[in-house]
Amino acid sequence: MAFVKRIGIDLGTANSLVWVAGRGIVLNEPTVVAVRADDGQVIEVGNAAKEMLGKTPGNIVASRPMRDGVIADYRVTEAMLRYFVQKVCGRFFLFKPEVMICVPAGVTQVERRAVLDATLSAGAKNAYLIDEPLAAAIGAKIPIAAASGNMIIDIGGGSAEAAVISLGGVVVHKSVRVAGNRVDEAIVSYMRKRHNLLIGETTAEEVKLRVGSATVLDKPETMEVKGRDYVTGLPRAVVVNSTEITEAIRAVLIQIIGAAKGVLEETPPELASDIIDKGIVMSGGTSTLRNFDRLMTELTGVPCHIAEEPLLCVVRGTGVAIENLDLYKKSVTRR
């Protein structure tokens, strides 16, 4: 029906993106919700809520309702989905939209049902689920329907998904609930142990973006980091360099690369030869970490390259799938 809107949502741990059929990406906001503690009333969602992280008074709680790629707080996630649907369809809508959400390929049936139920409760007429690696592959313009192997690793905020895709389906996949947020946590932990400095998630993310690198840089870069002294409790600033940060995050990056190695070990030989020819495609926000593709190539022995606009691959793939439901109906779950 022409009046029914079709919406694709990439419900990520760090950021949520919304695609509307015929219009493209209409929303790109952090997956953060600020709730009033006494009555559970949602105050802010997205950018406004992210600015409140770590700065709220006692009666307001700002949190991320998604953890490691799955719903951690059902009620808050439902409120956030309702906010997205209302932002796209208007506060009062006559025709309920059809909504497709992508989920990590490794989630359990219970976690899948939780996402479907939250979507229907938020006002959707029909709810569909698509696996994240498949959506990322469609968004990265990989010819997934061909009878040849294509490998993608989607590294977001909460989970990293590696998968080999052939004939429109996932042949082998591995999911690790280690990704961008764990990189930030590793920086927070390093600053506390090495410099006796307590910093927040937002500061850690800034350090990662400005001086973070997966491999040691030829010319180390430095940055001043401000936080609270662990011993005296007073504000203090220290200067850190990129080599320190590379050392701090290396263990987490090796865990992520472990998912790619696990998939390569289980890939049928015919598809493995295709992957060696084509290489591994990297998507998701964490894949943009400096020199991560170089480290991945070094440790797997397979050439790796970053997809065009890696942050948008999953939502674009979800959007293409909801716009062409008949083509992708084998690959989606419906409720």
Image: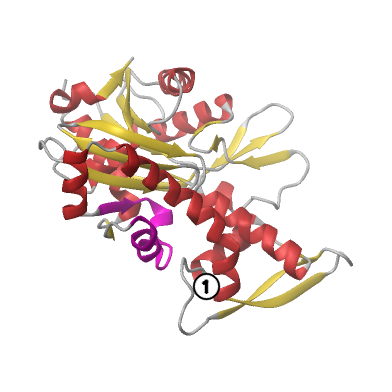
Residue linked to disc 1:
211
- Using the image, determine if residue 230 lies above or below residue 219: above
Taking the magenta stretch, the answer to whether it contains residue 170 is no
> What is the quadrant of residue 165 in the picture?
top left
- Using the image, determine if residue 108 lies above or below residue 284: above
Horizontal side of residue 160 vs 187, given as left or right = left
Q: Looking at numbered disc 1 in the image, what kind of residue is underneath it?
A: Val
Horizontal side of residue 187 vs 179, given as left or right = right
Q: Secondary structure at mark 1?
A: helix
**Given the current orientation, which residue lies at the most extreme bottom position?**
219
Residue that appears at 41% across and 54% down: 285
Taking the magenta stretch, the answer to whether it contains residue 285 is yes
Q: Which residues are magenta?
A: 280-300
Q: Position of residue 23 (x, y in %)?
A: 22, 42
Q: Position of residue 209 (x, y in %)?
A: 49, 66
Q: Residues within 10 Å of mark 1 (few under 14, many from 20)?
A: many
**Given the current orientation, which residue lies at the most extreme left position?**
146
Residue that appears at 54% across and 68% down: 246
Residue that appears at 71% across and 76% down: 238
